[in-house]
Amino acid sequence: MKTLTKLGAFALALVLVLGSAYTVGRVVGPPPTAAPVPAAKPAAAEEEEGPGGLAVSHESMTLKVITDNVPAGTKQSFAFQILQHDGTPLVKYKPQHEKLMHLIVARRDLTNFQHVHPNLGSDGVWRVPLTFAAAGEYRVFADYMPLWGIHGETLGADVSVSGDYRPQALPAPSTTASVDGYTVTLGGELKPGRDGKLTLSVARGGKPVDDLEPYLGAFGHLVALRDGDMAYLHVHPDGTPGDGQTAPGPDIVFHATAPTYGDYRLFLDFQHGGVVRTAAFTLRVNGPNPPPHGLSEEAFAAAKARNEQAARNGGAAVPAGSTDGSTGGSTEEGTHGHG
């Protein structure tokens, strides 16, 4: 993931800073004691950190949509490329969940969801037969991993589909969804910035389905899209089919982290009887967003209090630890935003 790259850059910067401090210390005094570097949480190498799909270009790669004439209700070959910084197409990929490319398609009102798997041509162009059922503005998400990559990447681009556009309101939050005679029940909740557990239980005709079939190496795949900007999360369930521990239903357990509070549209793909079906939910995530810049709740609350005190003092910064409203030298925590 990008966490590994960030840690490498941080370590290099730390070495340079400490080296400079030691050189100065030989002239003016002993080098300062460096604060211990906090232990980093191990990164999962196969998944992108945080929500993806908000950018068309990232890490020297760009999603280029080639199909530009898209009428509603007509099946056609949808084509796109992943271009590198020099304009050449990326042609080497590593499979993720049995496929080199996962293409997610959804209209901006979070309807008409599709999860398909294009084929890569010798010209570096991905193609897949695709039908945009209704007119409107769509977002396509290319979810993939370069062969040389250390984490998955998701790029997003908008596609305009011509025709009579009739946007739909977001369905109200619900814990049940029905599709083709199946009922899927959603249990659990998500909190902003915290790992949460969701359990989706599949039933048919009132009876639990305990013989779900593996689909792309799992008993279910969950995509979450945030209402408003379509921030993208692709979550895979606990366990692996055939591992001797993961039951083939009725419960499919996911662990996910919502980046912020707000409404999300959840799409669960599952396979039974040789057919892949998609159950859709609206989930409301409540609570405050996590503090910025990796601050703890306590440090963030203290910084906000100092900012508010500084505002009452006419903009002068309040030193850390001050409780009497006295002012002092400017500090980053006392003047930084996000309060």
Image (cartoon, rainbow, N blue to C red):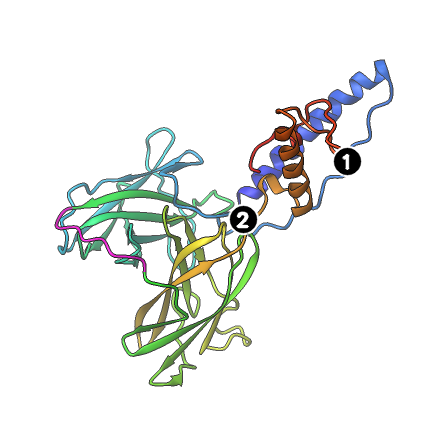
Residue at image x 14%, y 46%? 162
Please say whether residue 249 is visible from this viewpoint. no
Location of the C terminus (image quadrant): top right
User: As displayed, is residue 240 above or below residue 155?
Assistant: below
Disc 1 to disc 2: CB gap under 8 Å: no
Which mark is on residue 289?
A: 2
Q: Which residues are magenta?
A: 162-170
Whole-percent x, y for residue 75 in the image: 15, 55
Query: Along the horizontal axis of the image, is 12 left or right of 227?
Result: right
Q: Is residue 93 left or right of residue 114?
A: right
Disc 1 residue crowd, few under 14, some 14–19, many 20+, Cα 10 Å = few
Give the farthest residue toward the top: 27
- Determine if residue 160 is in view: yes
Question: Residue 271 appears at what percent x and percent y?
Answer: 35, 72
Q: Amino acid at mark 1?
A: Ala
Between 322 and 60, the residue placed more toward the observer is 322
What residue lies at 70% left-to-right and 46% top-to-bottom? 39
Vertical arrangement, residue 146 with respect to residue 174, above or below? above
Sequence-wise first label, 1 or 2? 1
Crowdedness near tag 2: few (<14), some (14–19) or many (≥20) residues, C-alpha within 10 Å: some
Q: Which residue is mark 1?
A: 35
Residue 317 falls left or right of residue 115: right
Quarter of the rendering containing residue 301: top right
